[in-house]
Amino acid sequence: QVQLVESGGGSVQPGGSLRLSCAASGFKFSFNSYAMNWYRLAPGKERELVASFGTIPNYADSVKGRFIISRDNAKGTVSLQMNSLKSEDTAVYYCNARRTSEMNYWGKGTVVTVSS
């Protein structure tokens, strides 16, 4: 079955950096046919699409210029480099792979805490 396994979360001070990774396996179709996305869910807030990478990367305005999404189609991985972190970036970050409305998969999430 499809598995998305996130890693790299943790605690960091404001202004610091973290790199999240997501390893995908079990896809029926080739990895590069899936849009790979990072979402986050913060307490009291709605789920937010932070960054996506279909054929090109796209970013939420809230992270543009600070976060970089990348994917390695050969390895079946997607990463999110997060720089200049702010307290408002604190959330659970989820890796998502989507090809169609039926082929839409989620990881279990990794916690990012930005606090002094």
Image (cartoon, rainbow, N blue to C red):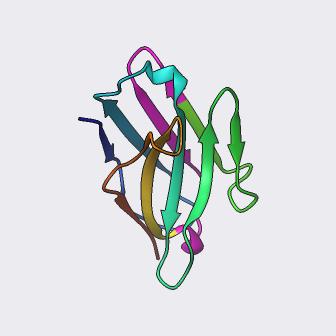
Pick whichever, 100 or 71, lies toward us. Answer: 100
- Name the spot of residue 49 as percent of width and height, x first: 60, 57
Q: Residue at x 73, y 52 (%)?
A: 64
On screen, 114 above or below 54? Answer: below
Image-based side of 107 in relation to 50, left or right:
left
Pick whichever, 84 or 38, lies toward us. Answer: 38
Image-based side of 35 in relation to 105, left or right:
right
- Name the spot of residue 40 as percent of width and height, x first: 50, 62
On screen, 82 above or below 56? Answer: below
- Name the spot of residue 91 as percent of width and height, x first: 46, 69
Where is the N terminus found, in terms of image quarters? top left
Which segment is the magenta one? 71-89
Q: Residue at x 44, y 39 (%)?
A: 103
Pick whichever, 11 or 73, lies toward us. Answer: 73
Seen from this angle, which residue lies furthest bottom? 44
Q: Quadrant of residue 109?
A: bottom left
Is 82 a magenta residue?
yes
Seen from this angle, which residue lies furthest front? 102
Is 85 a magenta residue?
yes
Image-based side of 67 in relation to 19, left or right:
right
Numbered-mark total: 0
- Name the spot of residue 36 as percent of width and height, x first: 52, 37
Q: Residue at x 51, y 21 (%)?
A: 32
Seen from this angle, which residue lies furthest left? 1
On screen, 7 above or below 60? Answer: above
